[in-house]
Amino acid sequence: MSNDDRIAKWRARREAERAAKATHGDLPTELALVAATAEPLVSGGDLESDTVLTFALDSLRRLPHETVGDRRQIYDAIARGIERGIEQIDPHPDYAELRRRQLRTIIRLLEADTRSGIDIYVAGFRPTGFTEGVTPLLTGYQRRKVRSDAEKISRARREALLADEAYTIAIPEDEEGDLMHLRDLMVRIDAARAPRSSHPMHMKMRAWIAVLRYQFALLRAESRLAIVWTMVGPAVLMGLISAGYFLSGISSVLNMDVATFAMTGATTWIMFRTVIFRSSMSFHAHRALLNIHPITPSMIGLMQGLVQMLAYAGAFVVLIGVGYLAGLFSLPHKPLAVAFWIVCMGIAAEAIGIIFGALAVVWHYFPRFAPAIERCMQIFSSVILVSEQLPDSYRPIALGSPLAHAMQLMRQAYFENYTSDDASPVYFFTGLAITILIAFMSQWIVRSRVVPA
């Protein structure tokens, strides 16, 4: 090395010392240099712990390290440099915390090996348990980063939705060809169709029909067992209700035969609860449809509920027809009135499903309590019994739910010899109107929080 090189190196070192003292003036020169050279540890976005380990070992080799106090000063200088780098560059908080934890873990491992008499200053040294100690740190950081990126995307989508703007994302290069092919197909499909009205009402009607067809396609694509359950589910509940009466030696309830009485309550209730859960679940399960402009969460929920109502209408017809031929059930006295009350209860179920879906958007743990709420509603909805079977003092409790009134009015229309003295159509329709109003307000409030998938 020539004299000029030595002079240049000395000047560079002096400049580095002056800069280090200017930043860390309360530290000795050597420790100030350690702190200054530790600042870049957080600047490059490097995730590897080996970088911090190598820097810590190099600093220990260059400076006095015989006592715990000497090593502690070096560790503190490195930590101070990292904090200084964080203040200057302001990296992501998770990355800054990763570097802090890596340094603390490395210090703990180095000190443990030093106290065990292991020579930590040999070339290529790695502390005992180094990989096991730092791997969870990196794994946790990557997991938090993925969650943070997902939240950032969700927030950007929500802001675009509130601003009524299209949310765009960068298309990966390997998917650009597929996107171009899809665009060409859509252009050809549009060219082959006749011109359509662009009136907002016509566009909404087409969207409703499209969502309904989509829900029917989903129902058809479900397993055969799921479709068969639309028949088996009411039959199971009907058997449980009937068994309780038959074991008690009761063959009729207020001039209603037990089998038909149980069938009307069981099938209607299974339809009611299925519409609720399918409608509320659709708020999250079909968020991809929200990328299509006219479609809203409530539209998806309503169409899902309508499909389930139509499926259970078929189940009603099959059960009544087969049961009548088998001598199990009687035919309805007023079929249109029975259908009217079943449809009204289905509308109430759709409204409750939208309310449940809106609550699930605000509080993600709410669906865990929905089955318990449904069981409580079942007890007070005249599914198993009617209010006339109870003493007068207990009847108001059984009639607290508007659904109980509709259920008894439906049975009144079904059975010629049964007349409900307690059920009130006004009470039911008042409760139905309030439920629909709450459903409308709740879906309007949470609309901005349901982002497309």
Image: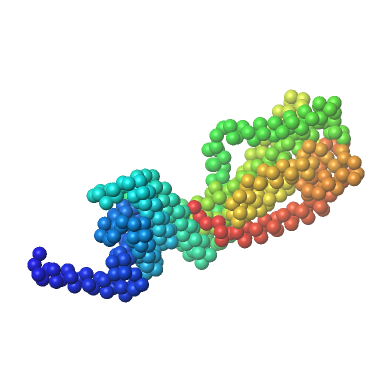
The percent position of residue 358, horizontal first and vertical second, equals 62, 54
Q: Nearer the viewer, residue 125 or 317?
A: 125
Tell me which residue sits at (60%, 35%) in the image: 227
Residue at the far top: name it.
Answer: 326
Residue 118 shown left or right of residue 260 in the figure: left
Residue at the far right: name it.
Answer: 392
Residue 329 shown left or right of residue 205 in the figure: right
Q: Nearer the viewer, residue 210 or 366?
A: 366
The percent position of residue 445, horizontal first and vertical second, equals 62, 61
Q: Quadrant of the N terminus?
A: bottom left
Residue at the far front: name it.
Answer: 67
Using the image, determine if residue 185 lies above or below residue 232.
below
The percent position of residue 161, horizontal first and vertical second, equals 51, 62
Using the image, determine if residue 134 lies above or below residue 4.
above
Q: Is residue 13 visible?
A: yes
Task: Tally the marks.
Answer: 0
What kind of colouring is applied to the model shown? rainbow
The percent position of residue 305, horizontal first and vertical second, equals 63, 46
Tell me which residue sits at (56%, 61%) in the image: 448
Using the image, determine if residue 399 lies above or below residue 41.
above
Residue at the far left: name it.
Answer: 2
Tell me which residue sits at (61%, 50%) in the image: 365
Tell me which residue sits at (43%, 61%) in the image: 93
Q: Nearer the viewer, residue 206 or 320?
A: 320
Q: Is residue 192 visible?
A: no
Q: Nearer the viewer, residue 36 or 32?
A: 32
